[in-house]
Amino acid sequence: MSKETTNFSSPVAKKRKLESEIEDNSVANNFGTTQHSKNSTGELENSKNHSINQQQQQQQQNFSNKKTMANGNNEEKGHKEIDEALYSRQLYVLGHEAMRRMAASDVLISGINGLGVEIAKNVILAGVKSVTLHDQQICSLADLSSQFYLSESSIGTNRAEASCSHLAELNQYVPTTAYIGDLDEEFLKKFSVIVYTENNEEEQKRLSNIARKLNIKLILAMTRGLFGQIFCDFGPEFVVYDVNGASPLSAMIAGISKDQEGVVTCLDETRHGFEDGDYVTFTEVQGMTQLNGCNPMKIKVLGPYTFSIGDTTGFDDYIRGGLAIQVKMPKTVSFKPLEEAEKSPEFILSDYAKFDHPQNINIAFTALSRFNTKFSRNPRPWNAEDAAEFLSLCKERAKELNVDELKEELLLIFAKISSGDLCPINAVIGGMSAQEVMKACSGKFMPIMQFFSFDAIECLPEDLSVLTESECQPNGSRYDSQIAIFGKTFQEKLSALKYFIVGAGAIGCELLKNFGMMGVGAGQNGELIITDMDLIEKSNLNRQFLFRPHDVQSPKSRVAAAAVKRMNPHINITYHENRVGAQTENIYDDDFFERLNGVANALDNIEARNYMDRRCVYYRLPLLESGTLGTMGNVQVVVPFLTESYSSSQDPPEKSIPICTLKNFPNAIEHTLQWARDMFEGVFTQSPFNASEYIRDITFIERTLKLPGVQPLETMESVKRALIDERPQNFADCVKWARFHFEENFVNQIKQLLFNFPPDQQTSTGQPFWSGPKRCPVPMVFNADDELHLDYIVAAANLKAEVYGVSQNRNRNEIRELVLQVDVPVFTPKSGVKIAENDAALQAQQDNNSFDQYRVDNIVEELKSLGKPNFSITPLEFEKDDDSNFHMDFIVAASNLRAANYSIPPADKHKSKLIAGKIIPAIATTTSLVSGCVSLELIKLTQDFKKLDRYKNGFINIALPLVAFTDPIHAKEQEYNGNKWTLWDRFEVKGEMTLQEFLDYFLNVHKLEITMLSQGVGMLYSFFQPKAKRDERMPLKMTEIVRQVTKRKIAPHERALVFEICCNDETGEDCEVPYVRYTLPR
């Protein structure tokens, strides 16, 4: 769930059963099954003339004319400009150039089965030029297990035609068309990439030959049961423009030697981070200026702070300064055609415990194709005779490839479940395959070279004898393809599950789709509960695929629940619009959690993740945890009494920018953007908030004077500025304020800084003060004709006007005329102004600051003389995604002006929004893959495995590509008095007891002497408390002590209290012990 600051007017859950909404058409009318927003997707539904009942010859002849019919946009219109509001999160992953190359690529996806629709969904969301859906198969009941855009009403129709309108809705910029003819060479030559998802050996070879001949990139993707495989052939010379997608590194230089092998030494504050073979160029080098702007130079890393760049003897002597900047160099890779690659296959491993699986899986898919050719069907579920026949075909294939050893047990399992089709497997392979399509179109990131195989056979029960042929036979259910793998009994378990999905964003949407297709919660007693407090925004549509343009500003949870209900009408789903946290524990209470089977997090912040983790540990529930960052993702499964919890390990905190660097010595655009963001908060949020509180709350002054340190003075000064000194009467006053503010920040402060530290200033060691990370600034000279200067005035003046309710003015020419009328006094630097050189000096300076009570008293009197203000002030809450509100305009202008002060390269609005808005880059492919892995762990939890090696934590970077799975970490064992325990254990104590009885209970029963006892942040008892206080509390009931200490009432929904205790063991030594669950009397 995004935007943790969002509040709802009522904490009560806005929940309802979607069945009733479907019945009264409220959901169908708002988010209808076949309705489309007013972009001519409706044309497709009404006319149904996109290839239906047309002859193949006519279809090909008219194909180019029909590409636009699904979306009603012509190709030229769709890709002249990238819609940054829609693609913003993906742009931060791919960049504009890669997106433009994708927007010039036509993609064919053949085989619109469960895997094909997953790939198509992700590719369409990504924003290619066009997508053609090809299929010649008719929808059957078996397709409904994983093809989420087919329904019972689709049975008997062509799969591509039935899915086309739904896929077309995903992205108005991508013309999407169905085609049911043959894939001949003439038809195929118009495509940049071909994706084939059927397992037909002969057709794969034919397409491979055509693709090679026509220089078309080919991706073969296939899934069966719990197995999947991808093959890529992008031709003999494919250019990768960016291998890993990481931002180019840079390092500040301390020295460069003049030598046959010149050595660059970097400042010792940070490691350079370069690797052998990287290329760098240079800028701002003084002395050895030949390096500035040089062609990329290949480096050899000598150490964490040094690297060599080759012969520098012909250059001038190095004096000082400079930056080494990494240059991403294109890399050309060569692919083998399919028939050649199969003879000596190269595999990307995903699980080193299964190092021998990929070759066997490759052989198995070929054998399956031959079995199908021979018998016109797949092997029957868990049929021993068919499995034996399949194994003989595998042996024949192994002989052709000169493979000596086969993993026969694995191959027999493959045969027995090969008629199965599982949505999570399709999500994993579909996410990976779609990313390969994007690589093929854009040259961004390293492709799969050339095979990727995957399996999840650990999902099968430990005792395979329970999976008999009769148990796994189809029974006319939409889950038949899943039953073919796990059997009817397991399907009943899935349908009875009650799962809580927290968050309906990108991962939440994908989890809902997977869970819905699997039938989780579809039984009489099963249920899915989804909560998200956010409304849908346009930027969500690029990856949160359950939402459409007409859903913008609707609640995420409601729209997502309705969409999944359409995919599988049998799902029992309830939506809430609540934040999870302490404030909603009256909703998500003991009754709520104790009826659940587990929780799946789909959150985007650490605080909420930690909270849900604590709740799952407390209620001893499994937790499925996952997250993404661009092309990277992770999956963690938390199993009660077996694994550690999410909170057991933490990432290191982000490195903060020193305050002095922000205030006076920035050297990177990140510094100026943070400075601008802080200025926005101070000027337009915090100061107006203080003033509005002063107006609203008669106790404001009393509360403020109790604040520590110099906060009373700073707060009261901000109120005075807002209400008296800087209060505008009209928009001209706002412009005048903006002009003064410009002068103060970009002229006067710089002049004062240079007065304190002149450009030729030297340190005590004789080194230039302005060197290394300290860049010597230059004061700005205001120019109303400079676009950046006027940007600042326009944004600052309009934000000031909004705070005070003054009518805004967006006319730049009028604002220019107003600002030219402002008379700005000349600034003269002052002696005696202290400017700290580093954070230590700044801290010492602040420690010595005295609290000027006289000044505070004067401000209070001045404010009182003002009387009760008859106007209102509105603090602004920063919103990065609204391009009309001037928030990002102000931050970009302020940051780039400060960057100009310090000769730092500026950043455009797109990059500035990423940094200042702390945006998490995201892409649908990663989300799809991660959600598939999470759903596989749900299957294992439902199997109730007790062995750690059955579960998998995943670490993914599909840019490299890297997919790595490891066993989860065991919960850490601790001990007291010979009793072993983990985080899943606790002391169960039934109340009510007095404090004395509580202490005696632990001493007598557990041989533990409690030395400290707390509840939340309240200390209830400690050995160092005054004896009188201890004695006073001893006869009191525990609940009474909690009320006295914490100053809160125990809520009616609370059944138990959690106590933390510190104890001495039998030997008198301190020992770690579990927490206490103190059950309250009912």
Image (cartoon, helix red, strand yellow):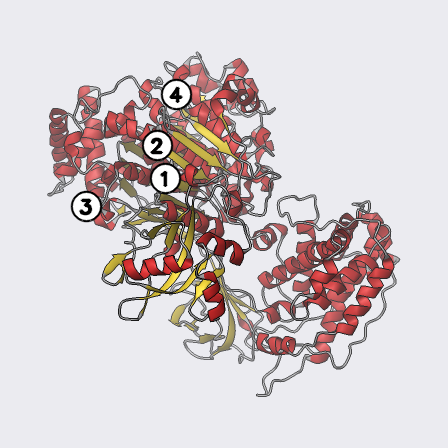
Question: Alpha carbon of mark 1 to alpha carbon of mark 4: how far?
Answer: 35 Å
Q: Position of residue 521 (x, y in %)?
A: 37, 29
For the residues bearing labels 1 and 4, Cβ distance under 8 angstroms: no
For the residues bearing labels 2 and 1, Cβ distance under 8 angstroms: yes
Graded by Cα atoms within 10 Å as few (under 14), some (14 to 19) or many (20 or more), the crowding at tag 4 reads many
Which mark is on residue 159? 4
Graded by Cα atoms within 10 Å as few (under 14), some (14 to 19) or many (20 or more), the crowding at tag 2 reads many
> Dot 1 lies on which element?
strand
Graded by Cα atoms within 10 Å as few (under 14), some (14 to 19) or many (20 or more), the crowding at tag 1 reads many
Under mark 4, the amino acid is Arg
Mark found first going from the N terminus, 1 or 4: 4
Residue under numbered circle 3: 356
Residue under numbered circle 1: 598
Mark found first going from the N terminus, 3 or 2: 3
Under mark 2, the amino acid is Leu
> Dot 4 lies on which element?
helix
Residue under numbered circle 2: 497
> Dot 2 lies on which element?
loop
Quarter of the figure with the C terminus:
top left
Q: Quadrant of residue 486?
A: top left
